[in-house]
Image: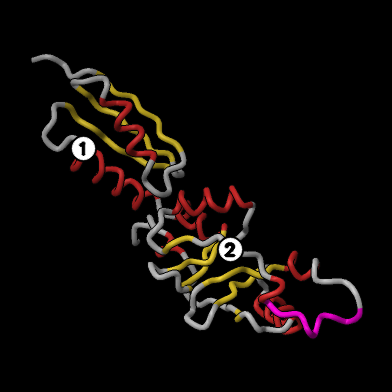
Amino acid sequence: MKHLRNVDDVMTHAVISVDRGTAFKDIVEALRMWNVSALPVLDQGGQVVGVVSEADLLLKPRGADTAHDTTAEQLMTRPAVTVTKGATIPTAARLMARGHLKRLPVVDGDGRLVGVVSRGDLLKVFLRPDEDIGAEVRELLVYQLIPHGPGEVHVRVANGIAYLNGSLQDPAMEDILVRAAGTVPGVVDVKADFTAPVSA
């Protein structure tokens, strides 16, 4: 299974959007048809200039039937909170949490819409098989962090929990290994039980 590290790995690539001139009723219909709570608003160059949500529609101007004169340009929240496709999954999660958002438009380096990422998408990392997570933890710890150092590290993953054990010459390495293992997508907790190597 592919390592799930960046937004590009989990986002939805097929995205429904509207332009600045899209009418109120057409926005409502698009939200209903695609069963989403918000839509990115794009300019003519495909750049995200705002987001129009169900909440924005409910706050439309009052008075005589203004719905048919009201457009996405008038309703949208701007500037849009977006995330780049190369951003890490934790970065996207923090943006969502900070803004109390359910989904984020994903943009390329020029600000053009390339996808959308939802809370559910970000949770995909926790569906990785334990074997895949364990292989990545092992590669990171055993082959990158201490390939030539003294000591021995064993890795086992069960239900997303990484169990590390073995022997380390330098006890300070334990904290480094635990923190490194915790950065692997899909790891929900790390438990370590290292001992000092037995002298010959």
| Viewer-side label of 1, 2 | 2
- Mark 1: amino acid: Leu
How many other residues sit within 10 Å of disc 1, few (<14), some (14-19) or many (≥20)? some
Residue at (65, 77) in percent of width and height: 34
Image coordinates for residue 109, horizontal then vertical, percent: 38, 67
30 w.r.t. 125: above or below: below
In magenta, the rendered stretch is 64-72
Read off the residue under disc 2. 79
Q: Nearer the viewer, residue 161 or 113?
A: 113
Tally of numbered tags: 2
Q: Nearer the viewer, residue 61 or 183?
A: 61
Residue lying furthest left: 200
Residue 17 included in the magenta stretch of the image: no
Numbered label attached to residue 44: none
139 w.r.t. 58: above or below: above
* C-alpha separation, residue under disc 1 versus residue under disc 2: 42 Å
Specify the quadrant that holds the N terminus.
bottom left
Read off the residue under disc 1. 145
73 w.r.t. 196: above or below: below
Residue 196 image-quadrant placement: top left
Q: Secondary structure at mark 2?
A: loop
Residue at (30, 43) in percent of width and height: 137
State the scheme by which the image is colored: secondary structure
Image coordinates for residue 190, horizontal then vertical, percent: 40, 34
Q: Of marks 1 and 2, which one's residue comes earlier in the chain?
A: 2
Viewed as shown, does residue 143 lie left or right of 111? left
Residue at (36, 46) in percent of width and height: 184
Image coordinates for residue 26, horizontal then vertical, percent: 71, 84
Q: Secondary structure at mark 1?
A: helix
